[in-house]
Amino acid sequence: MFAVDQLLAARYQMALSLGFHIVLSCIGVALPAMIYVLHRRGIRDDDADSLALAKKWAKASAVLFAVGAVSGTILSFEMGLLWPGMMSRFGDVIGLPFAMEGIAFFVEAVFLGIYLYGWGRLRPEVHLRTLIPMMLAGLFGTFCVLAVNAWMNAPSGFRIDADGDVVDVDPLAAIFNSALWPQFLHMWVAAYAVTGFLAASVYAVGMLRGRRDRRHRIGFTVPFVFASIAVVMQPVIGHVAGLRLATEQPAKLAAMELATTTESNAPLRLGGVLIDGQVRGAIDIPGLGSLIARGGFDREIIGLDQIPDDEQPPANVVHLSFQTMVGAGFTMIGIAAWFQWRRRRSEDPFGSRWFLRAAVAAAVLSVVALEAGWITTEVGRQPWIVHDVMRVEDAVTPNEGIWISLAVVVVVYAAMGITASLVLLSMARRWRASDDLDLPTPYGPDAPPELVESRS
Amino acid sequence: VNLADLAAVLMFVGVLAYAIFGGADFGSGVWDLLAGDARRGGHLRAQIDRSIGPVWEANHVWLIYILVFLWTGFPEVFGAMMTTLFVPWMLVGLGIVLRGGAFAFRKFSSTVREARLHGIVFASSSVITPFFLGMIAGAIASGRVPADGSGDIWTSWTGPTSWIGGTLAVLTCAFLAATFLAADASRAGDHRLATDVGRKAVWSGVVTGAVALLAALTLELDAESLASGLHGRGLPLIVVSAAAGVVAIGLLRTGRWAAARVGAVIAVAAIVVGWGVGQYPDLLVDEVTIDQAAGARSTLIGLVIVFGFAAVTAVPALIWLYVLVNSAEWSAPEAGRSEH
């Protein structure tokens, strides 16, 4: 029993660390492109508002990227601290994309430093271009990390011989596994949706509070358009990502669809929970399940009845998180469409307070969809850490007391999340109060006297 | 060339780079902690912000580089190390999170009180983190990390070599940082600060040297395998390190900051390489050699290719960053800069 508890603590710690980092990594991947658009408008069109936005976003990203960098570092520790069984056995099968991701992280960190400190120091065109390597590093880094995660769903590039040893390691085959491309694209595009809606919501809130200047309109529109394009693409990419499940990970598909019995012409099951083997409270649309998951009404979907009990993921968690993601996704598409409709039909697209509220909701929904989608794929793979090859309980650390490190991580991440939010809010407050975009530090020789005097 | 050795050397390049760049980065936080109240320490803290602000994230990617090279090239050793040394690695992770977050938060604080709170977190985690990294190094160097990960979760990293390793790590970071900061302050035209930090560099250098002698004695008693490696192959490097350290301190005393920085880097680099050479061919001392620990051959080739890829992408970028940061224009305080 105690061993089971250790496993649960390790899983919670990993879930918390990843669930925290995934939001910040989205911002790290997608924000440089949005800053690029603003910065470019600023210097090409001599547009002071766009340039001011780029400069503010750069400062905000200094805070967000710092938290993202350190929470990402922790993950590399936790791969070994929590899952030494997997890393010892498969490190040389799937470590290489991590090594490449390290290089991408290097490039991103270097150009972030150059960009943040380059204001007024580099020639404007050169300064603008330092964002491009950051965008590429975000793209490549996403590819690398998702290659590893896809491999855990569709392990390839090795063989286990008669003695149980891992042999014939082929790192390229491991990287280019069958789940790679759709999973990578789904995540990369999600990063743009999340970052875009989050950034736009800041200005939607501002407009709701009556700040309707040009800067707010640009600050809303640029990221919102990025997110709109992204969110429209997601159902297609997600659909393709799901197609391999019927044959390669039937247990995950069965849980996502809450398919209790194996059937062709399987229904699409909206909502519902599984209680004692019975589906309660679901709305079934006949045949649609088979059509979406397999491309034909007559195609069979394997149900949980054909999956051994000890190889079943917790179906309710997977089903509800999957449907939450899909529901949030289509709602966001609706909000994005509303904006386009208003832009065409209305003289002032921001005239409707209901639209602005919806835009704020889109930011919340984007994070909900991100986390729910990630829970779907991770929990849907249980009890495996490497699908059909290694169980989580065989990978987890033998060390006891993981509850303690979990508690520490909970406290530290809560403190860090709250502090980062407070710092960003305080930056926004100071920017509203004065036109000075450079936020002076309250210490040091150049500190404004009124800040130094305020110490107690 | 033996492929496993090559992969180990490439990984060790990361250890060396992290010791120098990460070390100077951590050490800045040590001086931040000792800089006094907001009024007295403001000059130094502003210089620390300028010196490590653009580079700190890149400096700490070296640690990730080391870990990914280790788990890809030598997966079982990675698993063993993370299992036996769970506690210090967890503490290092905690320190890195608190330090990076607090450093960024402090820069954008709105009041001195806020800045002080973030500053204390940043500076104290700058001491704790290298200390535990030094303890980890001590555990490996003294042969206390078994190849199967079955080492005691407490005593494996609390032996004499770990204590002296942690102490030496913090002092080395402080010495490096003071020489770097003195050169930076002088380039920024703040000669009073340069002289002040230069004095700190001198005394921290002397203390570091003294503790290094104590460490040598500790290794003789507590880490015999490493000690015997250091008597043989490693000896020239120890001599180089000692000589470079003495020269660096001499240069600091005469105010030649830029040259002193080179001396300090050589002193630290030589001792780190000495550690690597001294424990070769063991990856975990007395437990497992590089050859025994090496993972699949195809993956080792992949690692070499990734390193080559890094050499043409990340390394030139890194060099550009360091050149910029060390240029006269980037060294100047921010006030009075023109906007574009």
Image (cartoon, coloured by chain):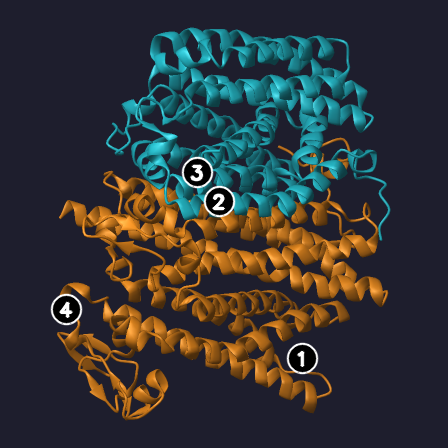
Chain colours: A orange, B cyan
Name the residue at 72% across, 12% down.
Answer: B252
Q: Earlier in the sequence, mark 1 or mark 4?
A: 4
- Frontmost of labels 3 and 4 is 4
Which residue is disc 2 drawn over?
A: B303
Which residue is disc 3 drawn over?
A: B93
Q: Amino acid at mark 3?
A: Gly
In the rendered view, does B148 fall on the left or right side of B210? left
Instruction: Classify residue B269 by image quadrant.
Output: top right
Asked if residue A217 is positioned above or below residue A113 in the image, the reply reads below
Circle 3 SS class? helix
Which residue is disc 4 drawn over?
A: A308
Task: Pinpoint the chain carrying mark 2.
Answer: B
The alpha-carbon separation of the residues under discs 1 and 4 comes to 54 Å
Task: Pinpoint the chain carrying mark 4.
Answer: A
Q: Amino acid at mark 4?
A: Pro
Task: Pinpoint the chain carrying mark 3.
Answer: B
The alpha-carbon separation of the residues under discs 4 and 2 comes to 39 Å
Instruction: Classify residue B204 by image quadrant.
Output: top right
> Do tag 4 and tag 2 residues touch (Cβ < 8 Å)?
no
Circle 1 SS class? loop
